[in-house]
Amino acid sequence: MKTKIIVTLILLQTLLSASEGTKGFGLQVGEQGTGVLFHQTWRSTSKFQWLFHGSIFDVKGDEQLMVYDYYTGQYRSVGDKYVLIVPLFGGGKYFPFADQIANNFAPFVTAQFGPVLTIDGAESDKFVTRWGKSKGLWSVGGYVGLGIDFLMMNGMMVSVGAGLDILPMNGIVDGEEHYNGAIIQVGFNWLR
């Protein structure tokens, strides 16, 4: 398990320092929870870019609520799922209207697939116990979606997208065989 994580981190560092394109980070909100993302693109043609996309996604339970504890005077969460999903996808972005739309506005379609690490935390209120006794599962997943790149004059770019995460589990994780669902992403990018 530790070897796979080390190899993944080395591969990630190599990809993030590679050739010309853009790199960035962003936020995502979906049916299953929220997360942060990072990505890098490599321009192939004016209509197509290769990309690497990784994220850390915190899964929220269907029955998760914030409740007020009268004994402590604090709010606390009940119905939590202690699951982190780390997809590491490769794929492409296709720009069907490249060089046809003015004003730095670039709609795209994307498809991505790759390995997914799911970390299932132990059911415990203590952080160290929960993640110290967690188990990791590997599977293969994907993402399909569409979006718009808004190009800025200073080499920055804001990407907004929506799509479907396809995240099957390699077994049952907190009672679920998969964590598929719709997702919205906002990314902030810059030229490398």
Image (spheres, rainbow, N blue to C red):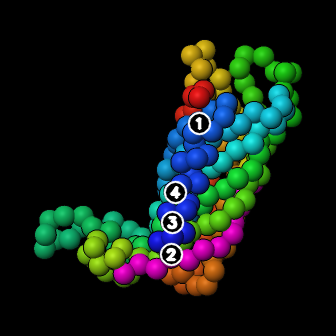
- Amino acid type at mark 3: Ile
How far apart marks 2 and 3 lie (CA) works out to: 7 Å
- Amino acid type at mark 1: Lys
Along the line of sight, the residue nearer the viewer: 1 or 149: 1
Q: Start and end of the magenta stretch?
A: 133-144
**Which of labels 1 and 2 is toward the front?**
2
Along the line of sight, the residue nearer the viewer: 26 or 24: 24
Percent position of residue 88, x then y: 61, 58
Percent position of residue 173, x then y: 54, 81
- In the rendered image of this protein, does residue 3 appear above or below residue 87? below
Residue 1: which disc? Answer: 2
How far apart marks 1 and 4 lie (CA) works out to: 17 Å
Please name the residue that numbered disc 1 is placed on: 23
Q: Specify which label sits upstream in the sequence, 2 or 4.
A: 2
- Amino acid type at mark 4: Leu
**Which of labels 1 and 3 is toward the front?**
3
Kindly state the secondary structure of the residue where label 3 is placed: helix
Q: Specify which label sits upstream in the sequence, 1 or 3.
A: 3
Kindly state the secondary structure of the residue where label 1 is placed: strand
Please name the residue that numbered disc 3 is placed on: 5
Can see residue 185?
no
Q: What main secondary structure does the magenta stretch of the protein show?
A: strand
184 on left or right of 123? right
Kindly state the secondary structure of the residue where label 4 is placed: helix
- Amino acid type at mark 2: Met
How far apart marks 3 and 4 lie (CA) works out to: 6 Å
Please name the residue that numbered disc 4 is placed on: 9
Residue drawn at (75%, 42%) of the image:
50
Residue drawn at (59%, 29%) of the image:
192
**Mark 1: few, some, or many residues within 10 Å (few <14, many ≥20)?**
many
